[in-house]
Amino acid sequence: MKTVLILGAAGQIPSFLIPQLLKQTDFNLKLYARNATSRLHVTDPKRETVIDGDFNDHDTLNQAMDGVDAVYLNEMRDITSVKNIIQAMDANHVRQFIGATVLGIEDEVKGAFGQWNTSMIESSITKRKTTAKAIEDSDLTYTLLRLAWLYNKDGNTNYELTESGEPFGGTEVTRQAVAQLIIDILNDNSRKFARKSIGVNEPNTKFDKPSFY
């Protein structure tokens, strides 16, 4: 039975990911976040373990990695945190890493939308280029998710993927769809997502900016 560690488990994507992992899989979950015990509601205590900690808490992070098969990181803003996570995974022989990052880190967003996207999140792109490189330079079996602009819509789990070197496919995607993609990656045994950076968008959303802007 696989054990998945969700780092940043109190975030918005995990709010959809956690219940769907419990519903669709038999995985055990470790839920790691600052003040996690007060921010997270456990529905299956036999399968969910809540851990209070931040990414600079080396001892707690190392303890959290014990017995883990895969790690999902919900935020890749801070290079020190990402390096700490890589170090903890290496020390505990945890190989599979899935990380949520942003579109634009490979200069892959073209046209009017690309210009709008850069004007909106240029500083975020710069920071996440650095954290993505740290992951790519590691020996982890990583999958980086370059996410389009996020919104919520129950029942909409449609996603479209683009590879590195391809133009980004659309402007937006639901958090529900991202959660489903993460589950699909965790369930995949073919290694088709291994050591890849993939663009993630909703099909048929090639707009000049997200529809909710």
Image (cartoon, grey):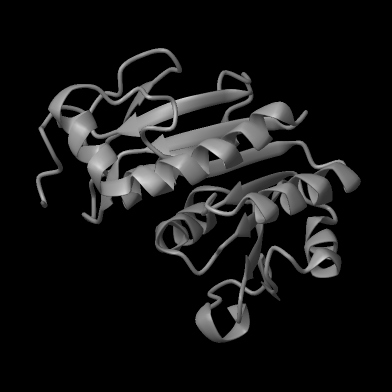
Q: Residue furthest right?
A: 91
Q: Is residue 36 above or below residue 59?
A: below
**Count of all numbered marks drawn on residues in the image:** 0
Q: Residue furthest bottom?
A: 38
**Where residue 7 appears, x then y in whole percent?**
62, 59
Q: Is residue 128 above or below residue 170?
A: below
Horizontally, residue 77 falls left or right of residue 91, namely left
Q: Quadrant of residue 166?
A: top left
Q: Quadrant of residue 16?
A: bottom left
Residue at the spot x=65%, y=28% of the render?
A: 136
Q: Quadrant of residue 178?
A: top left
Q: Name the one closer to the observer, 25 or 106.
A: 106
**Where residue 194 appears, x then y in whole percent?**
62, 23
**Where residue 186 appears, x then y in whole percent?**
58, 38
Residue at the spot x=53%, y=77% of the render?
A: 40
Residue 172 visible somewhere in the drawing: no
Horizontally, residue 183 falls left or right of residue 210, namely right
Residue at the spot x=61%, y=75% of the render?
A: 34
Q: Is residue 57 above or below residue 136?
A: below
Horizontally, residue 46 falls left or right of residue 9, namely right
Residue at the spot x=38%, y=24% of the render?
A: 107
